[in-house]
Amino acid sequence: MTSTIEARPLIDTFGRRISYLRISVTDRCDFRCQYCMAEDMQFLPKKEVLSLDELDTIASAFVARGVAKLRLTGGEPLVRRGIIELVERLSRHLKSGALGELTLTTNGSQLREHAAALARHGMKRINVSVDTLDSAKFTEITRRGRLEQVLDGISAAQEAGLKVKINAVALRGFNDLEIPFMLRWAHERNMDLTLIETMPLGEVDVDRTDQYLPLSEMRERLQKDFTLVADDYRSGGPARYYRVAETGGRLGFITPLTHNFCESCNRVRLTATGELYLCLGQNDKVNLRDALRSGGAAALDEMLDVAMRIKPKGHDFIIDRAHSGPAVARFMSTTGG
Ligand code: SAM
Ligand code: SF4
């Protein structure tokens, strides 16, 4: 890191230092998970999407301001054309030491093809989303995914030396009874498991009120079968972790609804069209693509300062009968989780 970077870290008006950028490299996906997307999604025209050069320039501007962690997400990041080239380009920041981690959240469907290249370009660990280990239910929740393909992708990632963490959205009446089994399955394969509360983003075809399962309840249920020992481990994200005595593995909980973690927020989110969202649950944003296209690197850098001035204090997600609509209209696939 140079002294200029040290002098100009990204700090918002609440004193939070931004060290983590999530980049949605595409809004497209080969799945249509029921809680994430509508069946009939309108995707962005390709010309509106940032080019690989623009993605690289914007990500690098953040690294130059002290961002130490980049996560590629989507939509499905591995369906973006040129994704491996982008990873290769960004890996120069790992080599220089400016970036501590370059990682990915994926549905796993394309991992067999790409895992080795990801590992070769410096990725160490990735998150793979799997909500059920039942093939028929998997195809139902993803509307078009094949569990076997994803499990094969996970094997490919492990063979390539990538550490895999499984993310599962906890859905009442869908996978809640299966979670003890998923926990054993993941831990036997040396993978941590993180459970996520469903968040009210985007108008989907299912009723989130019925599906919402507070993880405080899930934790109590798991404690009947497992000994959960609070663990200080932090992955740089909002998950709170426990060590499971019976399996030796880690179990994380991401609880935006039951336990708000905004006071320690360290992140911002770039969409595939270059909008920078400053909070997952609010609409505050700046347009980095327009800044870059109209004013080049200097305008982009200035816009990062504007962003820090308007980053909101936090989200206010609620899911109950009186609030069954989305907190914000955009889908999770816009900002990539
Ligand atoms: N396609 C990749 C995947 O599925 O991992 C990356 C993008 S996906 C939007 C990132 C994460 O967000 C996934 O773990 C997914 O399960 C989660 N997700 C999507 N919609 C959600 C929602 N409404 N509430 C909570 N998590 C959600
Ligand atoms: Fe695609 Fe991921 Fe959303 Fe599922 S959760 S539809 S895999 S972006």
Image (spheres, rainbow, N blue to C red):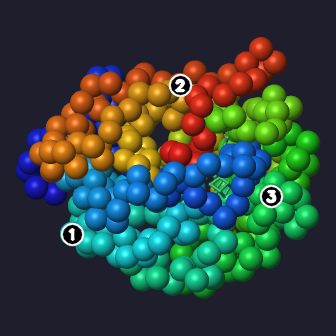
Q: Residue at x 86, y 57 (%)?
A: 140
What is the tally of numbered marks visible in this picture? 3
- Is 84 on the left or on the right of 181, as rendered? left
Residue 223: in sight, yes or no? no
Q: Residue at x 36, y 27 (%)?
A: 311
| First-in-chain label (1 vs 2) | 1
Which of the two residues, 227 or 156, is positioned nearer the viewer here?
Answer: 156
- Is 308 on the left or on the right of 331, as rendered? left
Q: Amino acid at mark 3?
A: Arg
Q: Which residue is mark 1?
A: 96
Which numbered tag is attached to residue 315? 2
Query: Which x, y percent locates residue 184?
Result: 81, 63
Q: Which residue is mark 3?
A: 143
Secondary structure of the residue carrying numbered label 3: loop
Q: Residue at x 60, y 68 (%)?
A: 164
Residue 39: in sight, yes or no? yes
Residue that protrudes farthest toward the top in the picture: 322
Q: Quadrant of the N terminus?
A: bottom left
Query: Which x, y percent locates residue 135?
Result: 88, 67
Q: Amino acid at mark 2?
A: His
Marks 2 & 3, CB-CB < 8 Å contact: no
